[in-house]
């Protein structure tokens, strides 16, 4: 039996804590954590919607009641299909993190393989994308992910 379960609204604060762990590992920011309270209501809403386009899978921390050991979260969206993905359904992994005190136990791998990738399959995703840190590359490569040469660009829209 897998330790992985789908996150529920009551997990929202811990999901945000683990997301912050991941963000801090990639690019520490002076305002780390300051956005959690504003993000919490929307995250709870999304976690409460099992039919929605967002899912998070977690492993409970074995030594701390109420804490999470690992997280894998992602979304499914539609993009116009192509030869490699005719349906156009694409999964995007955007947050995989393990509590520093629970690392090297396979929890993040389990959240991805037993949780998120299965969820993507159930939704018909023909392609899964992610951005990997150097530390996470071995995990993703072992799961079959390969680097792409496509340039990735971003625009941050701020309220007017």
Image (spheres, rainbow, N blue to C red):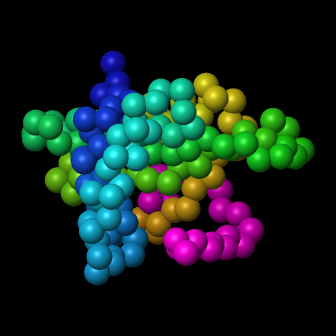
Q: Residue at x 59, y 49 (%)?
A: 92
Residue 55: x and y in percent read: 47, 37
Looking at the image, which residue is at 26% across and 66% down? 33
Task: Give the dominant element type of the magenta stretch: helix, strand or loop.
Answer: loop
Could you tell me which residue is drawn at 40 percent across and 38 percent down? 45
Quadrant showing the N terminus: top left
Between 132 and 24, the residue placed more toward the observer is 24
Residue 87 image offset from top left, x and y in percent: 81, 35
- As drawn, which residue projects farthest toward the right? 83
Q: Is residue 157 magenta?
A: yes
Residue 105 seen by the camera: no
- Looking at the rendering, which quadrant does residue 150 occupy? bottom right
Residue 141 in picture, x, y percent from top left: 56, 53
Residue plotted at (87% across, 46% down): 82
Q: Could you say which is closer to the camera, residue 36 or residue 64?
A: 36
Q: Is residue 82 above or below residue 123?
A: below
Kindly indicate the quadrant of the structure image that contains residue 4.
top left
Residue 127: percent from the left, percent from the top?
Answer: 70, 44
Q: Is residue 73 left or right of residue 10?
A: right
Side (left or right) of 9 relative to 42: left
User: 34 above or below 5?
Assistant: below
> Magenta region: which residues?
136-160
Kindly give the residue lying farthest to the front in the view shown: 160
């Amino acid at each position: 039996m897998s330790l992985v379960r789908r996150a529920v609204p009551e997990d929202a604060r811990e999901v945000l804590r683990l997301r912050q762990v991941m963000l801090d590992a990639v690019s520490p920011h002076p305002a780390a954590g300051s956005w959690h309270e504003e993000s919490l209501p929307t995250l709870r809403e999304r976690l409460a919607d099992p039919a929605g386009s967002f899912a998070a899978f977690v492993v409970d921390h074995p030594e701390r009641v109420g804490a999470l050991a690992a997280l894998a979260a992602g979304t499914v969206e539609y993009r116009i299909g192509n030869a490699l993905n005719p349906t156009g359904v694409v999964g995007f992994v955007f947050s995989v993190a393990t509590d520093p005190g629970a690392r090297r136990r396979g929890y993040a791998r389990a959240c991805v393989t037993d949780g998120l990738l299965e969820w993507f399959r159930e939704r018909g995703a023909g392609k899964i994308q992610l951005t990997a840190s150097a530390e996470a590359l071995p995990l993703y490569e072992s799961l079959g992910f390969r680097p792409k040469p496509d340039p990735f660009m971003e625009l941050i829209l701020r309220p007017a």
